[in-house]
Each structure stands twice: as structure tokens, then as C-alpha cells.
Amino acid sequence: MAKLSFKFSIKDAKTEKLADTLLSVEKDTLLKSDKLTDEEIKNIPEDLFVPHALDEAAAEKTGYSSYSYWGSTVRTFRQNKMAVAMLGIILVILLFTFIQPYLPGQYDPNLINNDPVTGMQIMNEPPGEQFWFGTNAIGQDMWARIWAGTKNSLFIGFTVAIIQAFVGIVLGMIWGYVRATDFFFTELYNVISNIPTTIILILASYVMRPSIRTLIIAMCVTGWLGMARFIRNQVLIIRDQEFNMASRCLGTPVWRVITKNLLPHMVSVIMLQMALAIPGAIASEVFLTYIGLGVPLDIPSLGNLVDSGRALMMSPSLRYQLLFPAIMLSIITVCFYLVGNAFADAADPKNHM
């Protein structure tokens, strides 16, 4: 017969009494078992039913968990090879926009290049050994302008995404959790959302001087509304769940309930919204430039590069001036979309191993 051992930790007299009771119950249950014969029951040694001393170190080990939310998120994200590759492309593009001006043989993006023999502008020079992406209508190097424009457009996109996320999360949390503010924010949302975003962008660009700062302000005036509305809906779903009710009953401050109970549940959706806001801001910049309200031409951006190339689209020999910035814009948009979706899935605890 296999030996059995029942271990109990003894800490005080009350616990010892409870342990003795449990030992007695276990022994009676074993003695009454139909699977043991009378002879086997008589041969059961008494020392099998001896309580053991308390081992606090062993008790701590049984409650230990090596789970890490961010560690599991990173491991899950790394399993998506396509998303990892897209993230690598984004990082390479972002890094190259900073180091490109310092590489040998690079031209200033606003420099008008002249032929050293004739003194004439090197206009609409096709891609070649000297100008890898060719030149534009006034002799500026397209290679340098595309990388400078990518840097400026990414700066606009990241800045707009961060501002929209911060304002949208703060106001959305208050809107969804504090019931007294629901009427005010709902009416504010209804009023502003019924005004076409295009009109607001146009008015802001007309009122202020055209610049990168103007574009950022114009996009952030109403851009936070979508994020705030989304966060508010997410808060309403989990606001009255048991763990939040328990926190309120214990007198936990509102700010702590929001930051500790609500916000961690929405990391995945927030990161997805931010990842999509970056190409969205770049697309808005391209649109404003298309209608003549973007940044000045002396500030390269993907918007004014695409707009300049659009006018030459019907000329086969000059289509490269639209093709190269459009390819860069497409790569950035697709990469951010795939990375955002993959990270949102990875940040969902239900997908953790």
C-alpha cells in the first residue's frame, strides 16, 4: 500500500486544535474506505498523521507568480513576425531622418542646385548618380527633401497623437467616471462634432500663420473628441464592476481608481488609437497642403511634396516627383497600422500565455 502523509502548519493553539480535527477526519475517512481491508487498516502507522511545523518561506513560494504584464505583452508581440518587421522599418526610417543630413555627399533640402558650367538651375533632373531621386522644378534635391519632409511629417504625427491621447484620455476618464460631467461633455461633443472638421482646419489655418505649429494646433482643436468619446465608452463598461465598487466602498480617491483600476484595462485600445492617429495626422497635413493651407514650401513635408508632384502626374518623365514621396507616405501609413493592431492584440491580457 502506498504511504500517505497529511501535512498541516501549526502557528498557535487555535490552529493546532483545527489541525487535530482535520487529522481526525482524514483518518476516519481513510479507515472507512471500502478500498482497504481490515488487515490493511490495522497496519496503518500512526506517524502518518503527524502535523508539521509552520514554514513561512515555503508558504511564500506557493503564492509567488512570475507573470509580468509588459513582459507578456512584449513576448506576444514578438511572435508576430510581420509586425516586428514593420516596427523595424519604422525605427530605421525614423533614425535615418536624423542621420541623413550628416552623411557625406548630401545636399541641403532647400538648396537650389546650379550647373557649374552654365550656371543654370538643374531643373527636373531625373534620378541618377548625382541626384538619387532627381531634382524638382527649381533644382532642389528630391532625396534630401523627402527625408527632411518625412522627419517633419513624423514630428507632426507624433506630436498630434500624443496631445490628442493625453487630452482625450484625461477628459474621457472624467466624462465616463464622474456622472455629474456627463451632460456637459455630451453637449460639448454634440456641438463640436456637428461642425465639419475640414472647416475647423481651414479656419485655424487662415487665422494663424502657416507653420508646423499651426498645423498641430488645427488638428488638435477637435482631434481629441474621438479619443475622449472612445475612452468614455470603455469606462462605462467597467466603471460599476465589483472591484471598482469595492474600491469606492473603501474610500479610494477618484484619481486612484481611474489610474489604478480603469486605465490599465485600456492600454491596448489606447495604443491602437495612438498608432492610427499618427498616419491620420500625416494624412490631414497632406490634405491641408493640397488645398493650399499647409506648411510653407521652405519647410519640406510629405504633404507639400505630394502636392507638388500631383501637378506633374500627367507628365511621364516627371512622375518620379510624385512617386517617391507617395511611396514613403504609404510605407509609413501601412507600418503604423500593422504595428498598432499587433500591439493592441498583444496588450490584451486574454492573449497572454
Image: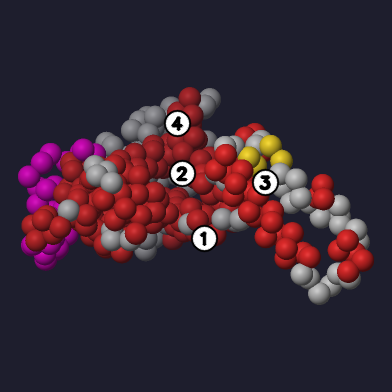
Work out whether mark 4 precedes mark 1 in sequence or the reverse, and give the earlier one: 4
Q: Say if the magenta span includes residue 273.
A: no
Work out whether mark 3 precedes mark 4 in sequence or the reverse, and give the earlier one: 3
> Which label number is shown at residue 350?
1
Examine the rendering and report whether any part of residue 145 can be seen.
no
Q: Residue at x 69, y 56 (%)?
A: 24
Q: Is the magenta region chiefly helix, strand or loop? A: helix
Tag 4: amino acid: Phe
Point out the frontmost of discs 4 and 1. 1
Alpha carbons under labels 1 and 2: distance apart: 50 Å
Point out the frontmost of discs 3 and 2. 3
Task: For mark 2, give the secondary structure.
Answer: loop
**Mark 3 surroundings within 10 Å by alpha-carbon count, few (fewer than 14), some (14 through 19), many (20 or more):** some
Q: Which residue is mark 4?
A: 98
Relative placement, left or right, of 26 versus 39 is left
Q: Residue at x 71, y 44 (%)?
A: 51
Tag 3: amino acid: Phe
Tag 2: amino acid: Gly
